[in-house]
Image (cartoon, rainbow, N blue to C red):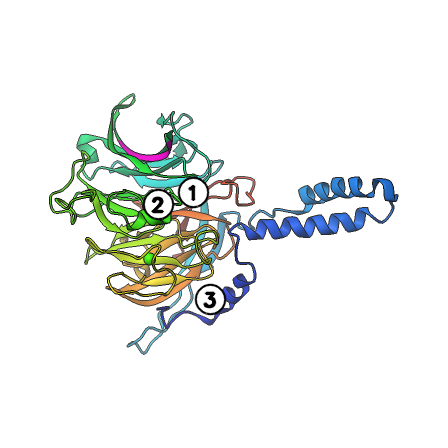
Amino acid sequence: MRPTGLSSVAHRRNKREAIHEIPRNDTKRSSVLVCVISGSFFCQMETTRMNRFLIAIICSFTSLVLACGQPPPGRGAGEVESTAAKSVQGQTQQQPSVSFSVQTVIGGLEVPWSIVWAPDGRMFLTERPGRVRVYENGKLRPAPLLTVDDVEPSGESGLMSIALHPQFATNHFLYLSYAYKSDGQRVRVVRYTETPSGVAERKVIVDAIPAAQYHAGCRLRFGPDGKLYVTTGDATERALAQQLDSLAGKTLRVNDDGTVPQDNPFVGRANARSEIWSYGHRNAQGLDFQPGTNLIFQTEHGPSGFDGPGGGDEVNIVEKGKNYGWPAIHHKETRSGMEPPLLEYTPACAPASGAFYRGSVFPQFRGNFFFGCLKGTRLIRIVLDGRRVVVQENLLDGKYGRIREVVEGPDGFLYFSTSNKDGRGSPAADDDRIMRLKPIE
Ligand SMILES: [Ca+2]
């Protein structure tokens, strides 16, 4: 179900990527291999047979350090980028391209996972090792607002999402999702109240969500209905995603205090968790509500070799009580009673976020769905007409490395975060960064 408007450039790129498919951090590994081979070759030329092997290893390591791991080329110093001009079905004239400059807003961060804005204009962001940071009046506060001290930061987990209550201005409720160690790894959602001196009144909202070093979710987003939506991973136990007595591999929906809304689909069903809104997910990390329709658009990571053929990343429209198939179906497979994805990406792009654009400074972006790609090192822009994909395109392709969060700022600029310090990328000197797209007048 690829959109018909997918550009030939994107097709060429997909072909190129296919060469490098699996494992997910393949680029780095192939660089290492090249360096080991080249280092061995040059170092072996003038050595005796006795020490050749040892010196080859030393030289391989040296050449690896010197020549491998290229940081992304983009500096975020105002480079000008553009969208492609588009032919849209039913319109005789092409939509003109949109030009914007790319600016670094904050540098020197460590895996910024989630960004939100308070009504007073402050930016709150999470860093995976456990810190909540505040950016205000053009500066990052040196001290974190909060450091979550029982975060388990390894693998794909750590401190993940942040959400502010829709009435944050009056109740000051701030929500976080993070991984912790218990009997194995778990994820919980907690709520704090911001105070003039920091935070207080920690309250657990959802606890003991199954997790693992990989596939731990966990995006938080308040819906237009005032409920808190939570994406969870399958904790690398695929079968859990189909089991309604487990919170793994689901979208959850809870009230702002963690109680369960009585109109949730599995309320009252035996052996089912009443928090569940949808199931059959592998590891969703992006979720937002389409302006106008309030449909939930969600991004989800597909299998990565050990649990299924690589690729199969998804964009889904998530609806009450529905089954999104994992692990029974994946990629473009279909089965009665299960929902196929709206969009599917093979090779993997690793979608890590998802946000609709509602602002006015990019009128051409209004109603578009954006998400950041880790392995795919780009932003993807989806132009929609309700449920129908009109066209999609890649932005910033390969320029800034791994991209995680994307979200609109109160100024209408489009903000995104890099994730080059997560152990799978090659950081630029000032990574990780929060950057933004600013329109060119
Ligand atoms: Ca699916």
Q: Is residue 360 something that shows in the picture?
A: no
The reply to whether discs 2 and 1 touch (Cβ–Cβ < 8 Å) is: yes
Comes first in the chain, label 3 or label 2:
3
Q: Are marks 3 and 2 in contact (CB under 8 Å)?
A: no
Three-letter amino acid code of the residue under disc 2: Gly
Dot 1 lies on which element?
loop
The residue closer to the viewer here, 439 or 152, is 152
Quote the CA–CA distance across marks 2 and 1.
8 Å
To which residue does mark 3 refer? 10
The residue range painted magenta reads 184-190
Residue 67 in the figure: left or right of residue 349:
right
| Residue 394 painted magenta | no
Amino acid identity at mark 3: Ala
Q: Main secondary structure of the magenta part?
A: strand
Q: Nearer the viewer, residue 301 or 184?
A: 184
Q: Are marks 3 and 1 in contact (CB under 8 Å)?
A: no
Can you give x and y, in whole percent of width and height, for residue 1 in the image?
35, 69
* Left or right of residue 290: residue 239: right
- Mark found first going from the N terminus, 3 or 1: 3
Q: Quarter containing ligand 1?
A: bottom left
Q: CA distance from mark 3 to mark 1?
A: 29 Å
- Which residue carries the number 2 mark? 233
Q: Is residue 187 magenta?
A: yes
Residue drawn at x 74%, y 51% is 38
What amino acid is labelled 1 in the image? Tyr
* Circle 3 Cα neighbour tier, 10 Å, few/some/many (<14 / 14–19 / ≥20): few
Disc on res. 214: 1
Quadrant containing the C terminus in the rendered view? bottom left
The residue shown at (47%, 51%) is: 306
The mark closer to the camera, 3 or 1, is 1
Q: Which residue is the extreme one toward the front?
A: 270
The label nearer to you, 3 versus 2, is: 2
